[in-house]
């Protein structure tokens, strides 16, 4: 909440300043405001972002081949990402930074995206200031989405005062705030928690099931709420950034779930992990597993996230194998009952995977799974 | 909409309109600024000793300067002569002789390029300096560094010191408003002479057909040295207090900015030539919704034919309405319009005449009925007065008040007109009229050339392109590069032929007339035919491979689709199957970078084409 309120107040001020400033200074005002915000609240992150921005842009100005420049930029981004993700340098962080420097996971991936698109020679002509504006964009610093450079450039060119867009943004911020404050902080964390506590030891299975259920719901509501706020704030500044969620719990299979959950990360991984690996090896299953492992490790470099990623990777691989069978073809024209059934199965697959990241250690994971999958409780 | 230049200028200088935006060019200009600058410019012209009816050449790449000068000429009763800065030294000297201007307002560098000081010693010559402020002027001001004084004779410095003139009424409806060069030959240039009455009559028609309002924002990035750029740009905006948007010139690199500009500048009307539409369509991936804004109303296509199937498919793809405007420099801008309403629209036609009348005549001058092909003639208040100093051309084209267009057309039972061809060899390439004889005159003067003939051939993007058939001289070695450079030095860039081919003899009839049909057949070489066939068969194979991978029937896959368009079945796994299918078929192996870039059928085709090039095999 502290982060959310800080973000909201800072962005409100930036929204005002960015529209009041003379036209050509409006976007630089946002970048400068972001830099001031970071420098004050998360100085470590400010330093890392400033240096890495300069270096990942600068390497492409060196007289070396583009592929080596891209490799250097990627290595640099990976180095500082892994350095903090494995817990090194944690003690130097401010209270707002918590475990890793604020927004680091997001801007590291944005910089890698930039490097790869430079390698592919797909980016339009741009200056260092365009790149700064892209990376120092406050609405998406905190919790994504991992928006792309080219659409951002387009937005920067198209940007003009549009009352409809502004009101849409305001509405999204409100939705996000309601999701976080009312649905998550009150309905789930207080009311549902009380109901689960009341069950007590009368039904261990039901209590455990509801605890995992509420954790899954809470994760989605909180994350999508923050995304709504980010998308809304960006809209209020005149930028339409990519959406991060599209009703993931209505997905009829696990492949579809990942097309709807944390879209900016999954599409990033599809473009930069899945396609290169499967193109190189001509083994799509290897591409799927690798992609899901990276998604897992992006969240946290730990065994539990590695297992979580592998679990989803295997799930998607199985679905792809199944989808090419005669049985899948026969069930293509399935009824709405079958569709509802597949949505419920998919949801529970995701819920089970959340046990892996909810519990503090592997013993607790095994214990929870044992309760959920046996009838003794 | 104003009816004459007085009401237009009065409207511009009115205090209540001073904050309205006149134009978005390199920067924003308000009607307040424009009004003051017009008053001052009229004063500058008067003080220079220029009299009512005198001819003033305007030649600048500064769109705002051209707008002020053109409107000031109209207001002061001077004859404006917009003159393309891309003219070569030869052309400018010849055309200056022809026009015999009384004053020249032109870019500083053109004075040197065209050696104006030597040619026009007795004329008023006012250079237009670049209005771009040099960087670092803020610190110079702070440090009080004296900047070098600009020449006080240059246009913008004169403007900053000039008094605002009293706007007295001087102009009559019959007075010449402007001269605009159109396709002519070297020996007989053609400058269309338009009076105020014709100009404002046509502006009124355009206003009614396009339904312009004060809130309209007109996107027109055509050159100001073409009637569609000049009249349908600053003038159409000024007469409606609308906004003219021309932040850059058309260029393929700017296509993304064109699409984004529709939203950014709240565009309501977009003036184009079909070539621009073809480019927009070609590079539209990801921009298909760009015209879906609350402000956008119509695309207006001018200057060259718009074929029915492309017209319809463009409208369907972008969910918009195109008005096809048929007109010539001689009709100011438009004479007939197809669209925007269902009762005025017929795809492939040039619509129905508006505020003028059409007739189709045979070779004896007799009017023809529906469905009969003949020459299209126009009568109305929007016609030219005459061709300036070209009595022969005037007499040949204006007969009993009817203007003979040289276009071959017909009309149907519903009264819609169709253009089927031309009586003469004139070609329209990318909306620009080119008289092949003019180019031929230049080429045939070169010592390497014994004989030559220029003609148009169809082109999918430009409508037509100019081709030159040349017979090399036997005593001098023929070098194509030298000939191209020679053409560049003596012709505007647009008039340099797109291709040259050598032949032993120009095919001619017994009476000496060039046989253009035979020349066109000769130009269709085997290589061209083979290339086209190879392209079409390769695309068909790629579509077949896509069909297998995406599990879609062939007819649901066209070369324009891409995986960013949420194409059914084109997910990441299907993409890989598609790639491996192609590798097997063409017996090639794509690199990871190539696979990542093959995001559309066209991109796949391009990659395969590159890999199959002999040097890569």
Image (spheres, coloured by chain):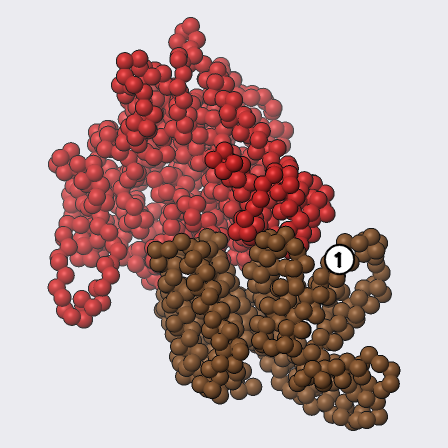
Chain colours: A brown, B red
Residue B476 position, x and y percent, is: 27, 17
Residue at image point 34% right, 61% down = B18
Reply above or below: B541 against A249: above
Residue B261 position, x and y percent, is: 46, 55
Tell me if I can see residue B461 in this picture. no
Query: Toward the viewer: B282 or B182?
Result: B282
Q: Chain of mark 1?
A: A
Classed neighbour count for the residue bearing mark 1: other residues with Cα under 10 Å, few (<14), some (14–19), many (≥20): few
Residue at image point 73% right, 66% down = A315
Reply above or below: A359 against A75: below
Check the image and name the residue furthest to the top: B510
Left or right: residue B217 versus residue A213 is left
Residue B565 position, x and y percent, is: 61, 53
Reply above or below: B456 against A185: above
Query: Toward the viewer: B490 or A310?
Result: A310
Reply above or below: B144 against B150: below
Residue A321 position, x and y percent, is: 75, 57
Query: Toward the viewer: B187 or A258?
Result: A258
Q: Mark 1: which secondary structure? A: helix
Residue at image point 57% right, 72% down = A298
The count of marks equals: 1
Residue assigned mark 1: A321
Tell me if I can see residue A223 in this picture. yes
């Amino acid at each position: 909440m502290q982060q959310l309120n800080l973000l909201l107040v800072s962005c409100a001020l930036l929204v005002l300043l960015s529209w009041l400033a003379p036209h050509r200074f409006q976007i630089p005002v946002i970048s400068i405001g972001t830099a001031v915000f970071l420098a004050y609240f998360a100085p470590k992150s400010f330093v890392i972002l400033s240096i890495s921005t300069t270096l990942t842009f600068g390497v492409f100005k060196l007289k070396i081949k583009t592929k080596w420049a891209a490799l250097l930029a990627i290595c640099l981004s990976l180095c500082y990402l892994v350095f903090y993700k494995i817990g090194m340098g944690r003690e130097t962080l401010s209270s707002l930074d918590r475990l890793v420097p604020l927004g680091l996971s997001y801007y590291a991936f944005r910089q890698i995206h930039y490097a790869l698109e430079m390698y592919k020679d797909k980016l339009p002509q741009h200056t260092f200031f365009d790149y700064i504006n892209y990376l120092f964009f406050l609405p998406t610093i905190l919790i994504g989405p991992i928006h792309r450079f080219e659409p951002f450039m387009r937005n920067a060119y198209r940007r003009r005062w549009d009352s409809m867009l502004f009101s849409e943004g305001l509405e999204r911020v409100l939705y996000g705030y309601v999701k976080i404050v009312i649905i998550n902080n009150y309905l789930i964390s207080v009311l549902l928690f009380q109901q689960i506590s009341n069950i007590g030891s009368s039904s261990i299975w039901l209590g455990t099931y509801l605890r995992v259920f509420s954790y899954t719901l809470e994760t989605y509501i909180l994350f999508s709420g923050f995304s709504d706020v980010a998308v809304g704030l960006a809209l209020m500044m005149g930028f339409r950034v990519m959406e991060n969620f599209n009703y993931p719990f209505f997905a009829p299979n696990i492949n579809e779930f990942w097309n709807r959950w944390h879209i900016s990360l999954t599409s990033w991984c599809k473009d930069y992990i899945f396609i290169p690996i499967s193109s190189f090896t001509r083994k799509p299953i290897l591409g799927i597993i690798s992609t899901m492992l990276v998604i897992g490790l992006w969240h946290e470099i730990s065994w539990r996230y590695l297992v979580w990623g592998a679990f989803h990777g295997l799930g998607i691989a199985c679905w792809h194998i199944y989808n090419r069978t005669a049985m899948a073809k026969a069930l293509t024209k399935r009824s709405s009952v079958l569709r509802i059934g597949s949505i419920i199965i998919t949801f529970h697959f995701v819920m089970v995977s959340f046990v892996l990241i909810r519990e503090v250690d592997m013993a607790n994971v095994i214990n929870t799974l044992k309760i959920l999958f046996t009838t003794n409780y | 909409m104003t009816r004459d230049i007085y009401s237009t200028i009065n409207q511009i200088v009115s205090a209540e309109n001073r904050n309205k935006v006149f134009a978005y060019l390199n920067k924003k200009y308000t009607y307040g600024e424009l009004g003051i600058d017009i008053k001052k410019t009229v004063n500058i012209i008067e003080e220079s000793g220029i009299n009512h009816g005198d001819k003033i050449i305007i030649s600048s790449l500064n769109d705002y300067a051209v707008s002020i000068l053109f409107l000031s000429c109209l207001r002061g009763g001077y004859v404006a002569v917009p003159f393309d800065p891309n003219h070569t030294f030869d052309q400018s000297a010849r055309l200056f002789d022809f026009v015999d201007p009384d004053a020249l307002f032109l870019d500083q560098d053109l004075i040197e390029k065209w050696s104006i000081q030597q040619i026009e010693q007795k004329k008023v010559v006012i250079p237009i300096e670049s209005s771009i402020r040099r960087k670092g002027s803020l610190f110079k001001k702070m440090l009080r560094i004296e900047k070098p004084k600009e020449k006080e004779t240059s246009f913008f410095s004169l403007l900053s010191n000039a008094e605002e003139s009293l706007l007295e009424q001087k102009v009559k409806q019959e007075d010449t408003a402007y001269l605009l060069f159109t396709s002519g030959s070297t020996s007989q240039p053609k400058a269309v002479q338009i009076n105020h009455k014709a100009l404002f009559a046509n502006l009124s028609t355009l206003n009614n057909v396009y339904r312009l309002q004060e809130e309209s924002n007109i996107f027109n990035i055509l050159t100001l040295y073409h009637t569609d750029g000049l009249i349908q740009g600053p003038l159409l905006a000024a007469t409606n207090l609308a906004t003219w948007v021309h932040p850059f010139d058309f260029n393929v690199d700017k296509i993304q900015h064109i699409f984004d500009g529709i939203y950014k500048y709240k565009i309501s009307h977009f003036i184009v030539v079909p070539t621009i539409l073809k480019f927009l369509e070609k590079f539209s991936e990801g921009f298909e919704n760009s015209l879906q804004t609350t402000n956008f109303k119509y695309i207006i296509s001018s200057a060259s034919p718009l074929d029915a199937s492309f017209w319809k498919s463009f409208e369907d793809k972008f969910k918009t309405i195109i008005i096809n405007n048929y007109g010539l420099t001689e009709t100011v801008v438009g004479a007939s319009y197809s669209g925007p309403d269902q009762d005025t629209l017929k795809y492939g036609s040039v619509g129905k005449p508006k505020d003028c009348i059409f007739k189709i005549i045979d070779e004896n001058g007799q009017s023809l009925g529906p469905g009969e092909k003949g020459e299209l003639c126009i009568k109305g208040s929007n016609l030219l007065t005459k061709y300036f100093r070209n009595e022969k051309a005037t007499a040949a084209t204006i007969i009993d008040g009817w203007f003979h267009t040289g276009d071959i057309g017909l009309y149907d039972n519903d009264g819609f007109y169709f253009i089927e061809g031309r009586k003469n060899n004139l070609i329209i390439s990318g909306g620009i009229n080119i008289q092949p004889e003019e180019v031929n005159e230049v080429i045939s003067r070169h010592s390497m050339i014994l004989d030559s003939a220029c003609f148009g051939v169809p082109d999918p993007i430009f409508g037509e392109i100019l081709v030159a058939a040349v017979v090399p001289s036997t005593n001098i070695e023929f070098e194509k590069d030298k000939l191209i450079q020679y053409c560049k030095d003596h012709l505007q860039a647009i008039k340099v032929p797109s291709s040259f081919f050598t032949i032993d003899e120009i095919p001619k009839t017994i009476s000496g007339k060039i046989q253009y049909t035979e020349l066109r057949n000769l130009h269709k070489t085997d290589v061209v035919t083979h290339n086209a066939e190879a392209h079409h068969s390769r695309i068909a194979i790629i579509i077949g491979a896509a069909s297998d991978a995406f599990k879609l029937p062939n007819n649901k896959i066209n070369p324009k689709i891409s995986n960013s368009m949420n194409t059914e079945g084109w997910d990441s796994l299907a993409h890989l199957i598609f790639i491996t299918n192609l590798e097997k078929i063409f017996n090639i192996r794509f690199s990871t970078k190539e696979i990542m870039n093959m995001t559309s059928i066209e991109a796949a085709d391009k990659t395969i084409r590159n890999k199959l090039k002999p040097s890569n095999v």
